[in-house]
Amino acid sequence: MKPSCPILVPMIAGLILLSLPACKKAPAPAVARPPVPVTIGTVIQKDMPNHKEWIGNLQGTVTSLVKPNVSGNIIQRYYTEGTVVKQGEPLFQIDPAPFQADLDKAKADLSTAIAQETKVQQDFVRAQNLLAGKVISVQEFQNQQQNYQAMVAQVAAKQAAVQAAQVNLSFTKIVAPIDGMAGLANYEVGTYVSPNSQQPLTTIVAIDPIKVVFQVGQDDYLSLIAGSLKDPSLAEKQKQEDRAAGMQMVLSDGTVYPQKGTFRAVNNQISTQTGSITVEGNFPNPGMLLKPGLFARVQATVGVITDALVVPLDAVITIQNLHQLAVVGPDNKVAIRNVNVSFMTRQQAVITSGVSAGEKIVVQGIQKVTDGCSVMPLPPTTTTAPAAPLAPEQKTSKTIPAASSSNPQSSAGAAAKQ
């Protein structure tokens, strides 16, 4: 029998070759990324108006809950719901019959008391004469005197009862306590109401001017009074400047309210729960179109930030609540830095920390750069294309104001910009 070695040798040789490590090709040399063409700007330092923005809601300057002072059935409603009423204008009529009867009875009781007073007064005068002639004793005279004084007091009580009955009768006609816009009626004709009724008959609010109430955080408040803290003599001047500057209001849909507002009042303490203080402002409301309950953004310029660090708004990278700048070094390499933004205008952003004056930053082309990449500065654009004329529907579009860093829409706008 022949050995099987000639067959096994090729198989063993193949297994050995398979077990040998595969030959690796040398890696290709890394291709250097070309510099990214960008437009460069500079962090400048200058005085900037201190723009602030807060979220508030509209309220009436005076809100009156119209409640009945007497009990009875409503027999008539005079006013039209949702219309303007004047002070003293009748709103509701409660059935006056029971109160008229009480008044008539009180007047009758008063007449009886007056007649009795006349008789007692005559007896008292007669007793005075008899006492002078020593016909009656002093005790009998004093009794007549006491009777007369008691009757005078009784007449006064009856007069007061008549006045009370007259007041209650007048309360059956419920009138507007203030000038303002009357709300919906909570009770219909025929309903029994009383001073203890759960709801008011209606509500009247004075809304011209209308009041906006908003919360100012303690950090913002401290920044507003920083100058006055350093020099208390400037406090009154600062208040006058703030009142003269006024406030701007932006409604919830982005509409800029055309009327300028003024500061009205500031609360006397900061809430320990929220760390904010309540501030009120007044805005003219011709036509009473604005209603209490609307939310709005309140913008104001309070003082000036000296030596503020200012960058173009296009240079700010906004990711949720994080703000960044692409800083360009002397070697044209980019470093992405986190910065703190105080507020933004339509063209600029005020930076509080993260960069220094004079540093170079990427303004255009920022969406193409990464941390550590090289850039190629382009010459700044000196000419701009003429603005296209507005279409008729664009001319009536809403005006969107400058947004601050605290506004959620500012982050969305910056993100869309990227």
Image (cartoon, rainbow, N blue to C red):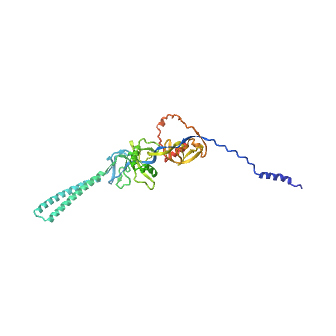
Q: Residue at x 87, y 55 (%)?
A: 3
**Residue 372 visible at all:** yes
**Residue 299 visible at all:** no
Q: Which is nearer the eye, 399 or 291?
A: 399
Q: Which is nearer the eye, 325 or 211?
A: 325
Query: In the displayed structure, would residue 261 be above or below residue 115?
Result: above
Residue 24 at what x, y percent from top left? 73, 48
Query: In the displayed structure, would residue 66 be above or below residue 129?
Result: above
Q: Is residue 3 left or right of residue 279?
A: right
Q: Quarter of the image containing the N terminus?
A: bottom right
Q: Is residue 392 left or right of residue 137?
A: right
Q: Quarter of the image containing the C terminus?
A: top right
Query: In the displayed structure, would residue 260 be above or below residue 104?
Result: above
Residue 341 at what x, y percent from top left? 51, 47
Q: Is residue 60 left or right of residue 108?
A: right
Farthest residue to the right: give it. Answer: 1
Residue 14 at what x, y percent from top left? 80, 51
Q: Residue at x 72, y 46 (%)?
A: 26
Q: Which is nearer the eye, 141 or 17?
A: 17
Q: Residue at x 18, y 61 (%)?
A: 147
Quarter holding residue 32: top right
Number of labels in the image equals 0
Q: Is residue 390 left or right of residue 168?
A: right
Farthest residue to the left: give it. Answer: 133
Residue 261 at what x, y percent from top left? 40, 44
Quarter holding residue 359: top right
